[in-house]
Image (cartoon, rainbow, N blue to C red):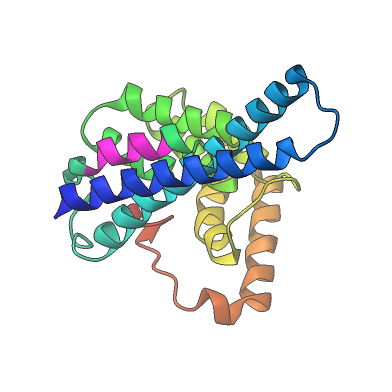
Amino acid sequence: MSALRDKALIGVLAIGVTLVLGGQAAADALVPEASGAQTTEAVGRAASSYLTGIKTFAAAVVWNRIDPVMHGYYSGVSLGEQRYMLSSIALVMALDPHQTQAYPIGSWILADNDRVADALSVAERGVEANPHSGLTLSNLAQMQYLYGEGLSAAAVTAERALDEDVEWMDAQQKHQWYPLLGDILRRAGRDDLDAVVQAELERLDKEHADELGEVDHDHDHDGVPDH
């Protein structure tokens, strides 16, 4: 059944590419006095844009098959034992580098299987592709602290995660990762920044109480266990 689904997905993607490029070509043909060079450039731009969209769609399809399995059937299995997900996670990152959730999951599976250098590399790639993502910055800070250059480097990354231009998926994600950032900063002697973290956590508790609900303090950020 999995093979059939994969073939069906490939067929859908191929049809999608044909339709969108065909539609763009037809639209370009209606533009008066367009030179051959202009038409070629227009088709090239359309191809790049639409193929990017198709790749993003494919990454979402793959991730949507991983996420329910990880949080459902294998919810009681440690990340280190879920090595079967690595190839799919690598595919998601290749298709859509901006799918931020794949980086912490992938890096933790690698770290739990003693592939520390690879785990750090994945975390760094996450920040390179998504420099304003609170999720990728927090994941890198934790990886640096536990497996990389140590507390000083982790504190620098944690401070970056507090910037105003950093984006979070929602209040719950921010609430889950901020205690980690505060812990790193406090251990690094940055009580001033930890105070900023605690103030923000208090604000989130007050303004997003319904959304936050009961937070599992034994597991952070999409099921990644504290270390």
Q: Is residue 126 visible?
A: yes
Looking at the rendering, in which quadrant would you find the N terminus?
bottom left
Residue 92 magenta: yes
Residue 147 magenta: no
Q: Is residue 143 visible?
A: no
Q: Is residue 14 left or right of residue 26?
A: left
Image quadrant of residue 170? Answer: bottom right
The dominant secondary structure in magenta is helix
Image quadrant of residue 75? Answer: bottom left
Percent across and percent down for residue 209 are 59, 79
Q: Nearer the viewer, residue 39 or 5?
A: 39
Stretch of the chain drawn in magenta: 85-93
Q: Is residue 42 above or below residue 12?
A: above
Q: Is residue 74 left or right of residue 38?
A: left
Percent across and percent down for residue 177 are 52, 54
Percent across and percent down for residue 174 are 58, 58
Image point 50% across, 34% down: which residue?
A: 126
Image point 48% across, 40% down: which residue?
A: 18
Image point 71% across, 29% down: which residue?
A: 42
Percent across and percent down for residue 10 are 32, 43
Image point 23% across, 53% down: which residue?
A: 5
Q: Is residue 33 above or below residue 191?
A: above
Q: Is residue 208 above or below residue 53?
A: below
Q: Is residue 68 left or right of residue 213?
A: left
Image quadrant of residue 198? Answer: bottom right
